[in-house]
Amino acid sequence: MMRTQVGIIGAGPAGLLLAHLLHLAGVDSVVIEARSRGYIEGRVRAGLLEQGSVDTLAEAGLAARLRREGLSHDGLELRFDGMSHRIDLHGLTGRRVTIYGQQEVVKDMVAARLETGRPLYFEVEDTAVHDVATAHPRITWTQEGTRQELHCDVVAGCDGFHGVSRGAIPAEVLRVYERIYPFAWLGILAQARPISHELIYARHSDGFALATMRSQTISRLYLQCAPEEDLSAWSDTRIWDALQTRLGAVNEGQILQKGVTGMRSFVAEPMRHGRLFLAGDAAHIVPPTGAKGMNLAIADVRVLARALTAFFRGEGEALMDRYSETCLSRIWKVQRFSSWMTAMLHRFDDNDPFEHRVQLAELDYVVHSQAARTALAEQYVGLPYES
C-alpha cells in the first residue's frame, strides 16, 4: 500500500503539468499511466500553444526547449473562393501562438517529473478509483502482475476521453453534452518543407484542408474526409493530389505517418465529484479546428493546481468548490469558438446551395471586418485566464 496527497491518473499534458505544479508548491503526488513511456512521447497530436499556455510552461520552468525549438506565429491565413486572407493575430491582440508538438511537451514534462524523483508508473493495467465521495479515496491498479493500492486525499482524473476516471462519477450526477460531426480529418506528417510560415485554413468545394508544421522541414497536413474513411484507399499520390487541389501548391515529400481522426464536441459536468477532479480530455473534447485541446487541458490544470495548493496549505476548499464552475465557463466559450470555426470551414454534404453561400458570406465578413477579425484573433490566441 502507498500513500500520497494527490493521486494522478494519466501522464498526458494535464496529468504531468499538474504533478509538476504541485511539486513546485510542495504537494506530493503519484502519477500512473496505462501506456508506455515510448508511446506517450511518440504520439503525434496537437501542436499549437496559445500565448497563455507558453507563459504557463515558462513560469513552471518547462519551456527551455520550447523557447529554442518552438515556431512563433503572428498570424494565420484563411483561403476560400481562390483567395488568401491573412489574420494578423499579433497586430489585433498583442499576442501570438507557438507551434510545438504535444509529444514534445510531454517529453519535457516526463523529464522534469523523473528529475524530481517522485513516482511515475507506466504500463499500469486494471486501474480503478474507489471511495471518491469520502475524504479518503483510493486508486488501485495492476503492474507486472502485482496489485497496487494508493491511498490519497485527492484523485485527479487526467486519463483522457477513454479513461476510467469519468466513470467514477455516478450516472445520476454526471451530465454529458455531445455532438458528433459528419466528417473527419485525414492527417499526414510529411518530410516536406511547410508551404507557409503560418497556418493555412482552406475552405474548398471538395472539403476543408489545413496546412501546418512541426518544424522547418516537417509538414503536418489535413484533409476533410468521411468518418468511416478507409485509409488504405488513400495512396500517397491521392493524398498529395487532394492537398494540391484544396490548398494550392504544396511541397511534397515522404509521408511519415497518416491517420483518420473523427471529430466531436464533448463536455462532462460537473468536473468535480467529492475528492475526484477531472481535467483535460477526461472532461471535454473539442473539434481540432480551433486548436484548443491541449490548451484547455493546461487551463484546467492552472485552476486545479491553485485550488489543491490552497487546500493543502490549510486554506480550505473554497477554490476546490469553484473548480468545475470556473473551468466550465472557459470550456463552453472554447466549445462555441471551435464549433463556429468548424461550421464555417467544412463542407457539410447535406448543405443546400443556400447554406454554401451563407458559409462564404461568413468568411467574407470575417476577413473584411476588423471587429470580426479581432473576435477570431482574441479567441485563437487564447482567452485571458481568471485572475
Image (cartoon, rainbow, N blue to C red):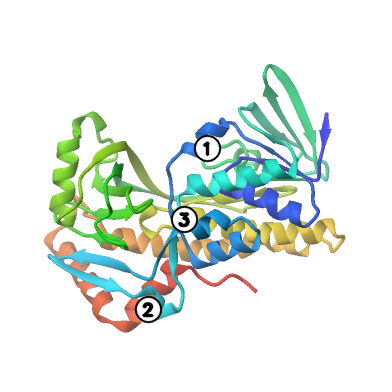
Q: Is residue 9 above or below residue 369?
A: above
Image coordinates for residue 255, horizontal then vertical, percent: 27, 38
Q: Residue furthest front?
A: 68
> Which disc, if any, is residue 374?
2
> Which disc, if any, is residue 234?
none
The residue located at (74%, 45%) in the rendering is 116
For the image, the number of numbered tags is 3
Q: Are marks 2 and 3 in contact (CB under 8 Å)?
A: no
Question: Is disc 3 surrounded by few (<14), some (14 to 19) or many (20+) residues within 10 Å?
Answer: some
**Tag 1: amino acid:** Ile
27 left or right of 237? right
Residue 216 appears anywhere in the view: yes
Instruction: Tell me how far mark 2 sits from mark 3, CA to CA.
Output: 28 Å
Q: Mark 3 highlights which residue? A: 69
Image coordinates for residue 170, horizontal then vertical, percent: 65, 41
Where disc 3 sits, the SS reads: helix
The residue located at (79%, 51%) in the rendering is 27
222 left or right of 283? left
Image coordinates for residue 262, horizontal then vertical, percent: 35, 42
Question: Is disc 2 surrounded by few (<14), some (14 to 19) or many (20+) residues within 10 Å?
Answer: some
Question: Which quarter of the rendering shows the N terminus?
Answer: top right
First in sequence, mark 2 or 3: give its number: 3
Q: Mark 1 highlights which residue? A: 40
The residue located at (49%, 44%) in the rendering is 103
